[in-house]
Structures are given as structure tokens and as C-alpha cells.
Image (cartoon, grey):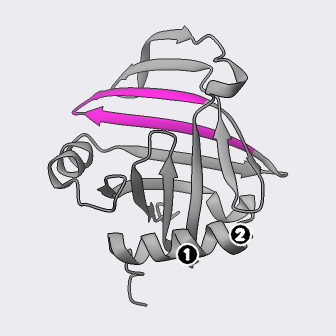
Amino acid sequence: MTALTTPDGQTLLGLEAEARRHGRGIPPESLHGEWWLDQLWGKQGNGQGSTTALLRGIRACLAITALDGRLQLRNSVRLGALTLEFSGPGWLGGKRPLLRFRFERMVLRWGGREIWQKALPAPAPNKLPFFALIACERSGNQGWLAARGRGGGLAAWRLRPAAPRG
């Protein structure tokens, strides 16, 4: 099987315009998995090469668990054995849809062992972070996800295949 190719910025802008007009029926189950940052673009679709390289270098990952229609998100970065992660619930709304989320906990891990954690205060309802989902394409254990964040940037992630069991 060949890898699914992440669209370029201009293609994503076209997909975004279509999603705004007609919506996208993206079911929660299609979001399930570990999504590793692949590309970033600015508000107008211009490439953000150095920021993308930095975030790839620290292994930026958006992990989404979808179970019985409920979403749990974990956003993390890793530098060597040190991992910083934020986690909390998420939910889909609207026809586009918007993936809204609230990080309730911040954890620092060393080699997988939790060394520090902090509960995070809830933001005001109108300040919740979100991703306006543009498209999600999956085939087996491969795929990509694209969205525009609250700050206006455009991001594409690649699905990390699950580790083989054995």
C-alpha cells in the first residue's frame, strides 16, 4: 500500500473553502490515533518551514482517543527523555465541524515516568481552543488530518501507525 500524501497548502485552502460552504461529515472515530505534525502554513497558506522543522524535531503529537462518541485529547512535545503533555476532553460541533477542547492537566515526564503535574484552570467558554477541521483521510493505518487553529494557522498531521502486536 502506498502512503497517503498530505496535500500542499494551496490544495488545503481549496478544501477549506469547500468545508466552509458545505461542511464535512467527519465522524469522531476517524480522528482516533496519534497524529504527528507534518506541515504548518500561515493564515494565507504560506509555508512555515522553520517552525515546522522545530516542531517535528521535538516530536509534536496530537493524540486523540475516540470512545463511544467521546473524545480525549493529548498534545505533547518530546526532547530526548523529557515529555511535556497537555490533556483533556474534546468534542465536535457544527457541520464543518469544530473540534473544541479543554486541557485540564499538564504533565512533565522523564523517560515515561511522571515527575510533575498540574491541574489547569478552565478557560472562559468563549476562549476555548479549537481546530476547524478541514479534512481527514485514512486508509488502514495511514492517513492525514488538516485543520485551522484558533490563532489562524493551518496544520496538517500524519497518522502514526499503531505498533505491531506480537
Q: Residues within 10 Å of mark 1 (few under 14, many from 20)?
A: some
* Residue bearing mark 1: 137
Q: Position of residue 152 (x, y in %)?
A: 44, 46
Q: Which residue is depicted at the point 31% across and 57% down?
A: 41
Q: Position of residue 38 (x, y in %)?
A: 33, 60
Q: Is residue 52 left or right of residue 111?
A: left
Helix, strand or loop at disc 2? Answer: loop
Total marks in image = 2
Helix, strand or loop at disc 1? Answer: strand
Q: Position of residue 149 (x, y in %)?
A: 49, 46
Q: Is residue 37 left or right of residue 54?
A: right
* Residue bearing mark 2: 23
Q: Position of residue 113 (x, y in %)?
A: 42, 21
Q: Residues within 10 Å of mark 2 (few under 14, many from 20)?
A: some
Q: Which residue is depicted at the point 50% across and 11% down?
A: 117
The amino acid type, in three-letter code, at marker 2 is: Gly
Q: Going from the N terminus, do you reach mark 2 or mark 1 first?
A: 2
Q: Which residue is depicted at the point 56% across and 65% down?
A: 134
Which secondary structure is most common in the magenta stretch?
Answer: strand
Q: Which residues are magenta?
A: 71-87
Q: Which residue is depicted at the point 49% across and 53% down?
A: 148
